[in-house]
Image: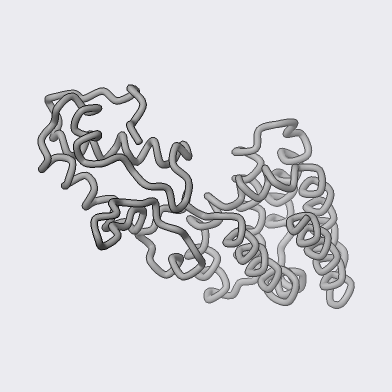
Amino acid sequence: MPIQNSTKIVRQEKISNQVYEQLLAQIKSNKWKEGAKLPSENEMRQEFGGVSRISIREAMQKLKALGIVETRHGGEGSFIRRVTSENYRDMLFPMFMIDKNSLQEILEYRMVMEVGGATEIAATRITKEECDALEEIVVRMEQNADDIKVFAHDDIQFHMGIAKATKNNMLTNVALFMQDLMNASMESIVTHLGMHDGRYYHRLILEALRYITGKKQLGLCASMWLRLWTGFQS
């Protein structure tokens, strides 16, 4: 399976690094799906202008070290590795490799945090200044017509603001730890679910944080996540 002629080698930089970066870019662009077999070593050498076998092997070793590529025994070749939630434990694993099943698990994590966790606690501790900061984010989301990347970023910042409003260092640190994962996953979630529900429910959550506490707040979040979960599974 040959590589398209989109590669360009600049000799001043270490060759294996250039090969690695270009292969990584092609994987990020979904040139090869999960489980797909990569071109052979000879095919890669030809497409990269006759670079050495060592350069190809060094580039492939980097991809294997990141967990993106696996080599199967018996001379089958190298393949794009299938990603599951188990890979999240390895922070070297690139976040762009998350699949739909993994996104469902991320939604479940957010449901736990925001229905029975951070949001309920924040509702009893949030300050006016913190509410005003969340208001600015929600307004941006409401005015965003089609920029999924910005919308996803604002979604993450909104919920980071809620985590900080809990005044609970453990909850805040967990949210910070998960932020890189969320940065990659939210674009996929927004692409799949659209922005309409996000605008609606983030406004409701903000108003609830301003005016409602206790069980009403919990019921609001539960309703939101039930709708989102149903939409994602369909």
Relative depth, front residue between 59 and 208: 59
Image x and y of residue 121, in percent: 71, 75
Identify the residue at image location x=44%, y=53%: 35
Q: Quadrant of the N terminus?
A: top left
Q: Is residue 50 left or right of residue 155?
A: left
Image x and y of residue 180, in percent: 48, 55
Relative depth, front residue between 50 and 155: 50
Identify the residue at image location x=26%, y=23%: 8
> How many labels, in total?
0
Image x and y of residue 111, in percent: 71, 68
Query: Relative to residue 50, is residue 219 depicted above or below?
Result: below
Image x and y of residue 94, in percent: 41, 53
Relative depth, front residue between 95 and 110: 95
Query: Relative to residue 93, is residue 60 depicted above or below?
Result: above
In terms of image quadrants, where is residue 145?
top right
Q: Is residue 5 left or right of residue 9?
A: right
- How is this picture coloured? one colour
In terms of image quadrants, where is residue 64?
bottom left
Q: Quadrant of the C terminus?
A: bottom right
Identify the residue at image location x=82%, y=69%: 222
Relative depth, front residue between 6 and 94: 6
Identify the residue at image location x=65%, y=71%: 166
In terms of image quadrants, where is residue 201?
bottom right
